[in-house]
């Protein structure tokens, strides 16, 4: 099978490209990247050594796609992944839309031209913020968990399901991904293309680039190891807010089954995929893990809330397990061990990979 991965030299794209190449399935792998992200250039040589054919191009520019070879499937891992994008003063709202929505449209047109399938790696941040921000939670062992009141529809202690509300506001970032999902599914139905939308939890692993809003687990471990200033922001400054984590390589069995699927019902084409409740950690628990690994480090407190922040975000992937027989394979502690080993081996990683 001929497969094109967009954002191939980013953290997620390169991890998937490595996993696909090393699986030995005989795929012809192509990667597309614009190399504007610090750190992405470092992934080029490793991918080339594995036989991945890399193409320099920007999904925002339709003309950059004209020289790409036809493929059977596109895995779209190119995006601005920050929930603060467009409002943090570092990127404009127009740039965010161009990256995350216009780029999707261009790739869907590419798929239409070549009769290729399309897999969109989406996000948990498409779910509506107000009911999540107002979620009744209690702190147990240094971490929030749902409790103390009625839970909104589509949410349980196992996590947020695909039935949870996606009404605005979801952040500008979430809106671009939600719009991309809708367009992808419409292109699939209109032009009879195999299209899948995978809403991922926090993707984490070694080699993830160094920004808190784009990879909190990697950023926290690298910063803690270097004794950089860290703060628990919002929620009384106690660090009880919780996220789950997923290693990108664990997506490979799911992607393989999707790319080889025959006719399936339309409601099977959109799923959550994450580490779920077993992989969920609060920042306070993450700091405790770091203290055991790296020694003590004082973490500050800032109770002032940030835009779009929520106390507890865990995805329920039961639908993915039911339909695709998929479950994450890498426990959270193993992901943290891998990140820590990479951080210890790369002492300048934050400076090397952070864009600002």
Image: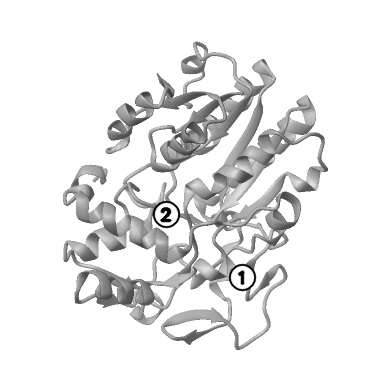
Pick whichever, 336 or 33, lies toward us: 336
Q: Nearer the viewer, residue 159 or 253?
A: 253
Up the image or down, 147 lies above or below 37; here it is below
Mark pair 1, 2: CA separation: 26 Å
Q: Is residue 66 visible?
A: yes
Disc with the residue nearer the chain's start (1 vs 2): 1
Q: Quadrant of the N terminus?
A: top right
| Percent position of residue 264, x then y | 81, 40
Residue under the point 56% across and 47% down: 251
Residue 179 visible here: no
SS under mark 2: loop
- Display colour scheme: one colour
Look at mark 2 in the image and give the residue it sits on: 204
**Closer to the eye: label 1 or 2:** 2
Q: Residue at x 75, y 51 (%)?
A: 323
Which label number is shown at residue 155?
none
Which residue is at the front of the view, 218 or 322?
322
Q: Find the residue positioned furthest to the top.
A: 67
Q: Which residue is mark 1?
A: 131
Image coords of residue 310 (percent x, y)? 49, 69
How many marks do you count on the picture?
2
Q: Cβ–Cβ below 8 Å for labels 1 and 2?
A: no
Left or right of 233? Residue 80 is: right
């Amino acid at each position: 099978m001929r497969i094109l991965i967009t954002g191939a030299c980013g953290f997620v794209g390169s991890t998937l490209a490595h996993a696909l190449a090393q699986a030995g399935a005989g795929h012809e792998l192509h990667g597309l990247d614009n190399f504007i992200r610090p750190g992405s250039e470092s992934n080029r040589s490793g991918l080339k050594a594995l036989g991945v054919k890399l193409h320099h191009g920007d999904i925002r520019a339709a003309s950059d796609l004209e020289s790409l070879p036809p493929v059977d499937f596109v895995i779209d891992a190119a995006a601005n992944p920050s929930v603060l994008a467009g409002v943090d003063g570092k990127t404009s709202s127009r740039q965010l839309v161009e990256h995350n929505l216009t780029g999707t449209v261009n790739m869907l047109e590419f798929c239409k031209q070549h009769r290729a399938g399309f897999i969109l790696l989406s996000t948990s941040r498409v779910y509506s913020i107000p009911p999540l921000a107002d979620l009744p939670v209690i702190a147990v062992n240094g971490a929030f968990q749902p409790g103390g009141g009625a839970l909104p529809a589509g949410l349980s202690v196992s996590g947020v399901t695909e039935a949870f509300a996606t009404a605005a506001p979801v952040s500008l970032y979430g809106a671009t991904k939600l719009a991309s999902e809708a367009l992808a599914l419409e292109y699939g139905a209109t032009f009879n293309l195999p299209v899948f939308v995978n809403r991922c939890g926090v993707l984490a692993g070694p080699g993830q680039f160094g920004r808190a809003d784009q990879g909190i687990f990697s950023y926290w471990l690298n910063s803690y190891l270097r004794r950089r200033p860290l703060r628990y922001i919002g929620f009384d400054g106690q660090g009880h807010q919780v996220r789950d984590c997923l290693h990108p390589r664990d997506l490979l069995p799911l992607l393989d089954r999707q790319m080889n699927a025959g006719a399936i019902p339309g409601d099977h084409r959109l799923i959550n995929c994450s580490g779920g409740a077993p992989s969920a950690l609060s920042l306070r628990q993450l700091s405790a893990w770091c203290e055991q690994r790296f020694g003590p480090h004082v973490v500050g407190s800032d109770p002032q809330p940030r835009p779009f922040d929520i106390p507890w975000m865990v995805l329920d992937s039961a639908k993915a397990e039911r339909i695709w027989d998929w479950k994450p394979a890498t426990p959270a502690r193993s992901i943290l061990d891998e990140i820590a080993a990479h951080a210890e081996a790369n002492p300048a990683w934050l400076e090397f990979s952070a864009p600002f």
